[in-house]
Amino acid sequence: MRELADRLGASERTVRRDIETLRGLDYPISTIHGPDGGYQLGPGHTLPPLLFDHDQALAVAVALQTAPSTMFGLADDAARALATLHQVMPPTLRAAMESLRLTRLRNYWEFPGPPIDPAALTAVGAAVRQRCLLVAETLRPDGTRAEPGEPDFRPAHHVEPHHLVVWAARWYLVAYDLTDARWRVLRVDRLLPRPTTRRFPARRLPDDDLARFVMSSPDRGDTPADWECTGSARLALPAHVVARWAPGGSVVEHLDDDHCRLTLGAWSWAGVAGILATFDTELTDVRPPELVEACRRLARRWITIA
């Protein structure tokens, strides 16, 4: 006991209490008597002992079951992780986790996105942690390389990766682009990263609020979500303002300092028109004709409201 306490930097009383806590959580710990005795964790664990209490076990179960609703492409991995944890949990905690079997109902404002390539996400995350430059090439929305002259083509750039941000079920990289000498927000699922060993120093971020910076960046690489009805309009507002409040799965195009084009979708043309109306500004160059007619129908309905 004394040797274990010394190695852990704790008192013998603390060690005994912690051992009893583990036993209370059904971890198999046996006592070996004699001059060379001590404590031994029982066999059968494929992972190190997980020091979860009841509330933590419930939190893990809920997090793994709800993860696919906030990050598309993780459903299979989250299910496998939950199954693995069930196998190594003590019976008491396993029962607590199994008591929360959730049925997720789809919210129709969710917009499915392509799954993240684990290799790309790992490469970007490691580069952020180690502060190593990335050679970044942007992919088409279908995940293939664009050819020179195509709208989606952008030559590979050298970027300093600073932060990973998750917003609206998408992974974004906040990076300083050395090629263009400016800050960028890049969609990780549309990025082909090639890590380097070249280190870079910390740089002052473009905004103290990274969430605001990502949300207000209209050129972050988003593409319109697949809706039954998709339309666009020219808004008399700056792109960074519209980008911050536009719904997920929409695209904001900078036109000039005071105007932008918003492309978005919904399950009906009236839905698209209603979202456009929330920006409380002049709408021009509305497309397609079905959206124009939906705007007129809504205007006729609203004008009759007493």
Image (spheres, helix red, strand yellow):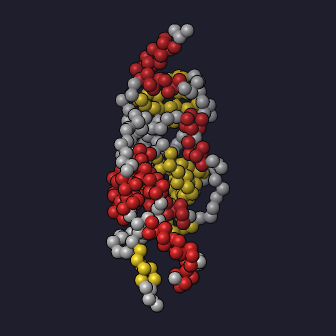
Q: Is residue 257 above or below residue 85?
A: above
- Looking at the rendered structure, the number of numbered marks drawn on it comes to 0
Quarter holding the C terminus? top right
Residue 295 screen position, x and y as percent = 47, 18
Residue at 38% from the left image edge and 38% from the top image edge: 106
Front residue of this view, candidates 114 and 177: 114
Q: Is residue 299 above or below residue 253?
A: above
Q: Is residue 149 above or below residue 21?
A: above
Residue at 49% from the left image edge and 23% from the top image edge: 274
Front residue of this view, candidates 219 and 81: 81
Residue at 47% from the left image edge and 16% from the top image edge: 298
Front residue of this view, candidates 295 and 18: 18
**Residue furthest toward the front?**
33
Q: Is residue 152 visible?
A: yes
Q: Is residue 191 visible?
A: no
Residue at 43% from the left image edge and 50% from the top image edge: 62
**Residue furthest toward the bottom?**
35
Q: Is residue 296 left or right of residue 114?
A: right
Q: Is residue 56 left or right of residue 256?
A: left
Residue 51 screen position, x and y as percent = 47, 65
Q: Is residue 80 left or right of residue 241?
A: left
Residue 173 screen position, x and y as percent = 52, 52
Residue 192 screen position, x and y as percent = 42, 56
Front residue of this view, candidates 222 and 215: 215
